[in-house]
């Protein structure tokens, strides 16, 4: 038998079933008990102030994917999208199980916005803690703010980026966002000195503007701006 010594009420688990537990693989990084007690080492890159953990894969619509050796995975939003959203008021999930492109409806600035991982996976659970504490989505986007848990399919990693490719794409996205803001929303003064993206940008926009921005950068059909 084995158990988690960190849990307030240890629950015995047969060692033969350890594969079913997140403790036996990389999924422990998303365990609430682990996150509440541990201080994980950061192996992160930063691009214009946005954290980019080096072990993650990134999609063109600013989602991340983390896979373990046994094919389990977690997905969530990256720091760029978290900064754009700012304060989140509500989170709901379209599906909680089954083979889907996982989707959540995020309410920020009074606007409902659909967040979709662009590739299908076998969805096994969602982070229901976020329904009670949605602020964690943007405060801890790479840990406690994860959205979806599942199992990877052959197409789950299609067109995802990592390493230098991901960092180059993120730099291009910062430039594209600044250009988009100055072209469409310049009177509102939404970019800080030096073109730094204003936190909580969505809440500074009208509903139609927020939807237009979201469609441009965070749609599941968003593309890498460096490519024709």
Image (cartoon, rainbow, N blue to C red):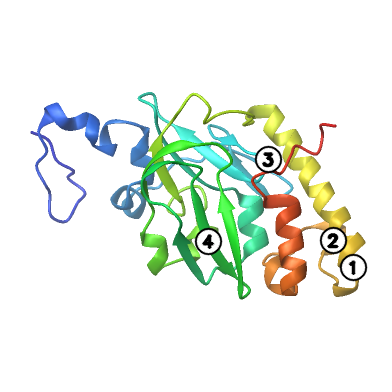
Residue 60 disc label? 3
Disc sitting over residue 40 in the figure: none
Indicate left or right for 191 with 183 as reference. Answer: left
Residue visible at 46% across and 40% down in the picture? 41
Q: In the picture provided, is 7 more to the left or to the right than 169?
A: left
The part of the image, by quadrant, that contains residue 150 is top left
> Marks 1/4: CA distance?
28 Å
Real-space CA distance between mark 4 and mark 2, rounded to the nearest whole angstrom = 24 Å
In front: 62, or 193? Answer: 62
- Place of residue 220 in the rendered image (x, y in percent of width and height, measured from the top left): 64, 45
Residue at mark 1 = 186
Do callouts 2 and 1 mark residues in contact (Cβ within 8 Å)? yes
Q: Give the labeled residue for mark 2.
A: 181
Q: Earlier in the sequence, mark 4 or mark 3?
A: 3
- Relative side of 225 to 100, left or right: right
Residues packed near mark 3 inside 10 Å, few (<14), some (14 to 19) or many (20 plus): many
- Is there a contact, CB below 8 Å, between mark 1 and mark 4? no
Q: Residues within 10 Å of mark 4 (few under 14, many from 20)?
A: some
Q: CA distance from mark 2 to mark 1?
A: 6 Å
Q: Nearer the viewer, mark 4 or mark 2?
A: 4
> Which label's residue is closer to the chain start, 4 or 2?
4
Residue drawn 24% across the image and 37% down it: 21
Residue 105: mark in rendering:
4
Rendered residue at 68%/72% (across/down)? 203
When the figure is inspected, residue 129 is found, relative to residue 158, above or below; the finding is below
How many marks can you see?
A: 4
Q: Are marks 4 and 3 in contact (CB under 8 Å)?
A: no
SS assignment at label 4:
strand
Residue 120, percent from left and from top: 50, 36
- Dot 2: within a 10 Å radius of its alpha carbon, few (fewer than 14), some, or many (20 or more) residues? some
Q: Could you classify mark 1 by the number of other residues whose Cα lies within 10 Å: few (under 14), some (14-19), or many (20 or more)?
A: few
Viewer-side label of 3, 1: 3
């Amino acid at each position: 038998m084995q158990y988690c010594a960190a849990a307030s009420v240890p629950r015995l688990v047969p060692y033969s079933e350890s594969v079913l537990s997140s403790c036996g693989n990389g999924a422990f990084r998303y365990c609430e008990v682990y996150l509440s007690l541990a201080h994980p080492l950061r192996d992160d890159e930063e691009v214009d102030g946005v954290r980019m953990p080096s072990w993650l894969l990134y999609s063109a619509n600013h989602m991340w994917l983390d896979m373990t050796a046994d094919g389990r995975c977690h997905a969530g939003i990256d720091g760029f999208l978290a900064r754009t959203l700012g304060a989140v008021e509500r989170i709901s999930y379209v599906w909680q199980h089954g083979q889907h492109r996982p989707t959540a409806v995020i309410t920020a600035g009074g606007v409902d916005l659909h967040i979709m991982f662009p590739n299908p996976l076998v969805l096994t659970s969602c982070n229901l803690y976020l329904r009670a504490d949605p602020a964690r989505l943007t405060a801890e986007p790479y840990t406690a703010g994860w959205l979806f848990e599942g199992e990877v399919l052959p197409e789950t990693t299609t067109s995802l980026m990592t390493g230098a490719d991901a960092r180059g794409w993120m730099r291009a996205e910062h430039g594209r966002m600044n250009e988009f803001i100055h072209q469409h929303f310049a009177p509102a003064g939404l970019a800080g000195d030096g073109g730094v993206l204003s936190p909580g940008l969505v809440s500074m926009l009208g509903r139609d503007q927020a939807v237009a921005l979201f469609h441009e950068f965070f749609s599941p059909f968003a593309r890498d701006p460096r490519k024709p």
